[in-house]
Image (cartoon, helix red, strand yellow):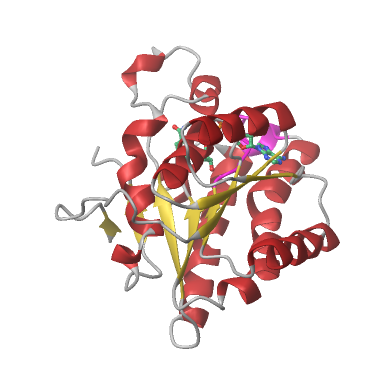
Amino acid sequence: MIHTLPDTFEAAPDCLQGKNILVTGAGDGIGRAAALTYARHGATVVLLGKTVEKLEAVYDEIEASGGPQPAIYPLHLNGAVFKDYEDLRDTLEKEFGALHGLLHNASVLGERKAIGQTSVDSWNEVMQVNVNAQFMLTRSLLPIMDIPDTASVIFTSSSVGRTGRAYWGAYAVSKFATEGLVQVLADELANTSNIRVNSLNPGATNTAMRRAAYPGESPDTNPMPEEIMPLYLYLMSDASREQTGLQWNAQNT
Ligand code: NAP
């Protein structure tokens, strides 16, 4: 069953006050919008991504709008090894003590080809960034997410991670793996932890990734990342503290 934003939810301006939230791929697209939105609602945001200039631009935007001072953590998810994630955890623990939210957002599209034509290098890169990095990041951060009385992990899925489609290759398979990780982790944590885990499909959104996947489509066919933020806020705020192991869609269509 697919869930959508409850009609009754309205994000209070300070609904993320006092929360420390890490966003991957925070420099562009949906991750950028999520980082800005979370900061606007009071969160201290850790901006993780691979292009430092993009992260700095988001940092500056948050500072200029008077949000809590964010932090930048440059990391190439395709090259990072587990020690890098442990170092990140140690840094966050030292700087912030605990983490209340983790948005797994960064992904790569890889080659849009038939499985029979997909290069092994492209397959491996997609699996490394979209699956292995998420596992390593989650595994290293769970201890500092278990400290607060409630914490939220959001994994970003896709419609091709729920029903397979020709020529979506490693990307689709990586999103199926993401759905699997959500189900296994949510089941493990349901009775042992205050950490909730959900899968969020943003739906078609006007970003660089969407434009690369559909070069013939007029970009303004789709909503901008800012328009799909209500569900991102709901799943990160305490309003969703009872929700775990579920699949969510940010758009109704
Ligand atoms: P995007 O515009 O391409 O942004 C992706 C972000 O991930 C960028 O900030 C990028 O950093 C970062 N990233 C990519 N590879 C990385 C790496 N190796 N290490 C660190 N960061 C890396 O994509 P988007 O459309 O916002 O997508 C966000 C999420 O939504 C993805 O999980 C995607 O699968 C999902 N999604 C999107 C749509 C859609 O229509 N847009 C639909 C369904 C699902 P740089 O900018 O520095 O490269």
Please state which of residues 25 and 203 is positioned toward the viewer in this rendering.
25
Q: Is residue 158 magenta?
A: no
Instruction: Please give the name of the residue rendered at 34% of the width and 24% of the height, measured from the top-left corner.
Output: 222
Q: Is residue 114 magenta?
A: yes
Looking at this view, name the residue that lies furthest to the left. 8
Q: Vertically, is 114 above or below 72?
A: above
Main SS, magenta region, reads: loop
**Magenta stretch, residue numbers:** 105-118
Residue 54 placement (x, y as % from top left): 65, 28
Please state which of residues 61 and 48 is positioned toward the viewer in this rendering.
61
Place residue 3 in its image quadrant: bottom left
- Ligand 1 is in which quadrant of the figure? top right
Please state which of residues 21 and 235 is positioned toward the viewer in this rendering.
21
Instruction: Please give the name of the residue rendered at 40% of the width and 47% of the height, measured from the top-left corner.
Output: 201
Q: Vertically, is 48 above or below 146?
A: above
Q: Is residue 167 visible?
A: no
Residue 71 placement (x, y as % from top left): 65, 46
Please state which of residues 68 and 55 is positioned toward the viewer in this rendering.
68
Q: Is residue 196 visible?
A: yes
